Amino acid sequence: MQGRTVLASFPAGGPHGSRPAEEFAREKCHEGQEAEVVMDLASDTFLVVVRGREPVE
């Protein structure tokens, strides 16, 4: 199983209609990274991650 690299985290309790994690992931996808949003239930946060490689800066 490949690892994941967390690019950013966002609190789950944002304002209604606000989706900062999805917007951040979309920006990273436009930059060529295969970013996705996952939920970390233990910390109640959304994580933007890439699988199996280091982030491109």
Image (spheres, rainbow, N blue to C red):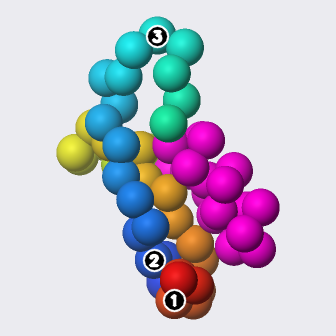
Q: Which residues are the magenta region?
A: 21-38
Front of the two marks 2 and 3: 3
3 versus 17 height, above or below: below
Report helix, strand or loop for mark 3: loop
Please identify the quarter of the rendering in which residue 35 is found.
Answer: bottom right
Query: Is tag 2's residue or tag 3's residue first in the polypeptide sequence?
Result: 2
Query: Is tag 3's residue or tag 1's residue first in the polypeptide sequence?
Result: 3
Q: Amino acid at mark 1?
A: Glu
Tell me the crowding category of disc 1: few under 14, some 14 to 19, or many 20 or more residues within 10 angstroms, Cα based.
Answer: few
Q: Nearer the viewer, residue 5 or 15?
A: 15
Q: Amino acid at mark 2?
A: Thr
Q: Quadrant of the N terminus?
A: bottom right
Give the residue at mark 3.
16
25 versus 41 height, above or below: below
Tell me the crowding category of disc 2: few under 14, some 14 to 19, or many 20 or more residues within 10 angstroms, Cα based.
Answer: some
Give the residue at mark 2.
5
Q: Nearer the viewer, residue 22 or 40?
A: 22
The residue shown at (50%, 36%) is 20
Q: Amino acid at mark 3?
A: His
CA–CA distance in space, label 2 to label 3 = 28 Å
Q: Position of residue 30 (x, y in %)?
A: 77, 61
Report helix, strand or loop for mark 1: loop
38 versus 30 height, above or below: above
- Asked whether residue 1 appears in the rendered view, the answer is no
Give the residue at mark 1.
54
The residue shown at (55%, 14%) is 17
- Is residue 27 found inside the magenta-colored segment of the image? yes
- Left or right of 8 in this view: 30: right
Query: Is tag 2's residue or tag 1's residue first in the polypeptide sequence?
Result: 2
